[in-house]
């Protein structure tokens, strides 16, 4: 038996038998605790207080028999029960299915030895059962482990072969895992990125507001979706569609973030080409209005310039000069707006004031639409700021306005652009397609045209659907509008009745705040001319341009305003002049588009000669590639032709004083 003190519970109401049992154990065992109870009720109470090592129970008791205990659930008797019984046939038949039966009273003297043997057998059987159970559990666990391991291997193979880039980070954004597709697309090996923050992948073109919204979303336990312009290891930029989700433990604590990324560079290029083609279509539809206005602008310039050769009074002379200046400014504005719209850059969303977008569109409409159409703009104070792509929102408005113009021709009518703040609740969202609860800015385009039949309302946004004659429309205008609005997480509604005009409402989500000075949109307008331009102090300026007329006029302007001027007709001549006069030259103003050596290569060569040389770049083109190249060389000041006297003098003054 165990060397520790054992607890034996005796269940019997015969005093003599109890005394005999106690004496038998006293002679043999010194380390045993004997407890006696007279009946089953006392037995149950005793077991509830302390579980014995084994029980010695008389078959017959005053409130039942041993069978009442043996027939109970096994978990109620986690110990051996030794049953004392007589020679009664009834007792034998009732107990024959159970072990550990002691004949009484003949065997009482040898009871300690019997208990030893039975207790040993019990422990041995329990140990074997435990071993078997452990073996079964181990087998099940091994099978489960192998199954889980197999699933993990399968999942790992799927992730490694995925066409998506997969990144797993810790809660602080430190990379812990990247798959093979990530290495293929970005050029970074896992060893180069694991342990680093994802910040090194940033291109610098995504506004900080985007990252702020991203972190607020995923830290709150929600999924974030969006697009990034990301930098590869070789410096090349590519577009990716991103989904970032938090991974939590059993109690909901975020342990990791999972980023799934898809390279959509080719898709973005195709989309940009399509949108540009669609814009060109609209510009073609505006061409007659542009040609009419340009001719009206050129007419007073030609007349006034001819009259300047004649002898005229001073007042008349000044008035003609002002007419030329104003006409030239109008022409430059129209050309700039049309070119900027045609070449607009998609994909870069920034904070925008909708009233600015609408005002710029109103300028285009007033310059290009027939005078029989009355264009008005109605925008309240404090219109909320939106996060969007200015060029694409201009395209939405222009598509809607061109359709409105066509619906009112040839007789003309009224076109009203307006906007307002609105908050959509759950009820409105539930009854409106693509609407979600939240705050929106609504931009409206309302016309007094022929309207749209009810039978067509449901199909006007379908690709290639058009009510125009063959050759007068592709049917892609409104489908393009829907695509752009959806990419801004917004939606569009239309109300129209035949002969009663139409109203299109474009809903763009907003944070519900008004930002006084957000990032400017892509359609920019220069400052008004100042009557007191900044003056020079004898500094030497090198002007580089392949247009002789520009060199002549610029030389005259700068000389009149206190500067010494050198000129060059191309980049190679400019380099020669700079090498000879580098000590005297304070600043270089160069055209970007020139033969032989353009402004970018000229600047690159000048920087090799003198890394601190100050350069202002000027161009009549708006391609961003040249700006990016020049920014990489440290050039921050750009002038878009045509610019006025004040803009040139101010740019020169600011560049010199900031050096």
Image (spheres, rainbow, N blue to C red):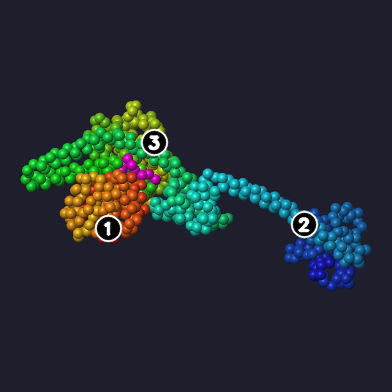
Q: Give x and y (percent) for residue 272.
A: 39, 41
Q: Give x and y (percent) for residue 20.
A: 89, 69
Give the secondary structure at mark 2.
helix
Instruction: Count numbered badges in the picture.
Output: 3
Report the side of 576 relative to 18 (left or right): left
Residue 502 picture quarter: top left
* Mark closer to the chain start, 1 or 2: 2
Q: Residue at x 79, y 61 (%)?
A: 79
Identify the magenta region: 340-347
Structural crowding at the residue carrying mark 1, measured as other residues with C-alpha within 10 Å and reported as few (<14), some (14–19) or many (≥20): some
Q: Distance between the residues labelled 3 and 1?
A: 57 Å
The residue that mark 2 highlights is 131
Quadrant of image for the C terminus: bottom left
Q: Which residue is drawn at 28% across and 52% down?
A: 576
Closest to the camera, between mark 1 and mark 2, is 1
Q: Residue at x 17, y 51 (%)?
A: 556
Residue 564 falls inside the magenta stretch: no
The residue that mark 3 highlights is 479
Q: How far apart are marks 2 and 3 (CA)?
A: 72 Å
Structural crowding at the residue carrying mark 3, measured as other residues with C-alpha within 10 Å and reported as few (<14), some (14–19) or many (≥20): some
Q: Which of 205 and 460 is in front in this view?
A: 205
Q: Distance between the residues labelled 1 and 2?
A: 94 Å
Structural crowding at the residue carrying mark 2, measured as other residues with C-alpha within 10 Å and reported as few (<14), some (14–19) or many (≥20): few
Q: Give x and y (percent) for residue 169.
A: 52, 55
């Amino acid at each position: 038996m165990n060397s520790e003190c054992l607890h034996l519970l005796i269940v019997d109401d015969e005093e003599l038998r109890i005394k005999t049992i106690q004496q038998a154990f006293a002679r043999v065992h010194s380390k045993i605790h004997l407890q006696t109870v007279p009946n089953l009720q006392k037995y149950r109470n005793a077991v509830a207080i302390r579980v014995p090592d084994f029980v010695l129970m008389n078959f017959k008791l005053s409130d039942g028999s041993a069978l009442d205990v043996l027939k109970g659930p096994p978990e109620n008797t986690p110990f051996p029960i030794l049953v004392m019984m007589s020679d009664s046939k009834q007792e034998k038949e009732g107990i024959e299915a159970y072990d550990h039966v002691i004949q009484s009273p003949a065997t009482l003297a040898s009871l300690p030895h019997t208990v030893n043997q039975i207790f040993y057998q019990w422990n041995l059987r329990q140990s074997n059962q435990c071993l078997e159970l452990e073996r079964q559990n181990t087998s099940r666990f091994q099978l489960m482990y192998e199954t889980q391991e197999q699933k993990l291997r399968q999942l790992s193979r799927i992730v490694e072969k995925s066409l998506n880039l997969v990144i797993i980070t810790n809660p602080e954004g430190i990379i812990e895992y990247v798959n093979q597709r990530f290495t293929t697309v970005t050029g970074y090996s896992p060893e180069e990125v694991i342990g680093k923050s994802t910040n090194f992948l940033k291109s610098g073109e995504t506004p900080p507001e985007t990252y702020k919204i991203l972190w607020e979303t995923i830290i709150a336990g929600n999924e974030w979706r969006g697009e990034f312009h990301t930098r590869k290891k070789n410096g090349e930029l590519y577009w990716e569609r991103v989904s970032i989700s938090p991974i939590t433990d059993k109690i909901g604590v975020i342990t990791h973030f999972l980023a799934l990324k898809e390279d959509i560079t080719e898709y973005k290029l195709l989309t940009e080409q399509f949108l540009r083609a669609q814009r060109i279509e609209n510009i073609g539809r505006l061409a007659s209005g542009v040609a009419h206005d340009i001719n009206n602008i050129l007419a007073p310039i030609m007349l006034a310039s001819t009259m300047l050769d004649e002898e005229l009074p001073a007042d008349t002379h000044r008035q003609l000069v002002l007419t030329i200046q104003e006409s030239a400014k109008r022409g430059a504005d129209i050309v700039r707006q049309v070119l900027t719209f045609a070449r607009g850059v998609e994909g870069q969303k920034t904070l925008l004031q909708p009233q600015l977008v609408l005002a710029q569109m109103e300028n285009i409409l007033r310059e290009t639409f027939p005078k029989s159409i009355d264009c008005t703009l109605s925008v309240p104070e404090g219109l909320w700021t939106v996060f969007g792509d200015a060029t694409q929102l201009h395209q939405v408005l222009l598509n809607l306005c061109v359709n409105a113009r066509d619906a009112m021709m040839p007789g003309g009518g009224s076109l009203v652009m307006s906007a307002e703040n609105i908050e959509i609740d759950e009820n409105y969202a539930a009854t409106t397609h693509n609407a979600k609860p939240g705050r929106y800015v609504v931009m409206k385009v309302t016309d007094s045209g022929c309207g749209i039949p009810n039978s067509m309302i449901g199909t006007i946004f379908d690709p290639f659907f058009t009510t125009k004659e063959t050759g007068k429309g592709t049917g892609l205008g409104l489908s393009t509008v829907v695509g752009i609005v959806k990419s801004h997480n917004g939606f569009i509604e239309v109300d129209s009745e035949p002969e009663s005009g139409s109203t299109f409402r474009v809903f763009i989500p907003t944070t519900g705040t008004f930002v006084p000075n957000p990032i400017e949109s892509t359609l920019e307008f220069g400052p008004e001319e100042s009557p007191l331009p900044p003056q020079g102090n004898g500094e030497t300026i090198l002007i580089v341009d392949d247009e002789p007329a520009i060199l002549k006029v610029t030389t005259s302007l700068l000389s009149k305003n206190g500067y010494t001027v050198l000129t060059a007709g191309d980049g190679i001549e400019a380099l020669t002049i700079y090498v000879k006069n580098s000590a005297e030259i304070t600043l270089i103003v160069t055209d970007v588009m020139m033969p032989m050596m353009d402004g970018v290569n000229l600047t690159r060569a000048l920087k090799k000669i003198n890394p601190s040389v100050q350069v202002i770049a000027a161009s009549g083109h708006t391609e961003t590639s040249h700006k990016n190249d020049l920014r990489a060389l440290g050039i921050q000041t750009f002038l878009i032709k045509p610019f006025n006297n004040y803009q040139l003098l101010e740019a020169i003054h600011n560049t010199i004083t900031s050096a």
